[in-house]
Amino acid sequence: MTTMPLTYPGFSGQSARLQALQTPFQPLDPGVVDASIPTFFVGQSRDGFWLARDANGEIGGAFLFKASALAFARRTSRPHPCATILLSEQFELDVENQGNPLIGWLKPLLRRLNIAGR
């Protein structure tokens, strides 16, 4: 897998670095992914759930499996193919969960079990 910068080359250095620390959702370089192509970020939350969120911050979902998150991205972008960016850092869903509705029930249970297991 090849890595590539996710920010525009014209961003000012300091503000771009500060912004990159705050959120993994940076504007995509138009030389890498055309703006007309639906783009999704896919990664894991701190609880281990798989998340898919579009680059525009309009839609997203939480899932039990990575394959489900990728399928959500493909299904949501139909009839066009989409670009997916797998993030190595954890992130939390900042839009309404339009994925697996059980995640809302499982998250507090897992957190409670994790605390009880310590």
Image: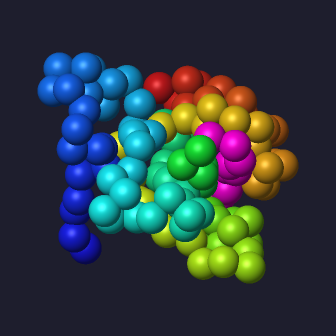
Q: Position of residue 38 (x, y in %)?
A: 59, 63
Residue 107 appears in the picture as rendered:
no
Residue 107 versus residue 100 in the image, above or below = above
Residue 69 versus residue 25 in the image, above or below = below
Q: Looking at the image, which residue is at 60% across and 49% down? A: 53
- Where does the magenta region start and end? 57-65
Considering depth in this image, is 79 or 91 the residue closer to the camera? Answer: 79
Please identify the quarter of the rendering in which residue 70 is found.
bottom right
Question: Does residue 33 appear left or right of residue 38 in this picture?
Answer: left
Q: Residue furthest left?
A: 13
Looking at the rendered image, the quarter that the N terminus falls into is bottom left
Q: Looking at the image, which residue is at 39% across and 40% down? A: 26
Image label count = 0
Give the image's coloring scheme: rainbow
Q: Position of residue 87 (x, y in %)?
A: 38, 52
Question: Does residue 15 appear left or right of residue 27 in this picture?
Answer: left
Residue 117 versus residue 30 in the image, above or below = above
Considering depth in this image, is 21 or 82 the residue closer to the camera? Answer: 82
Q: Position of residue 105 (x, y in %)?
A: 81, 39
Q: Looking at the image, which residue is at 41% across and 43% down? A: 27
Residue 25 appears in the picture as rendered:
yes
User: Does 102 lie within the magenta span?
Assistant: no
Q: Looking at the image, which residue is at 30% across and 31% down? A: 20
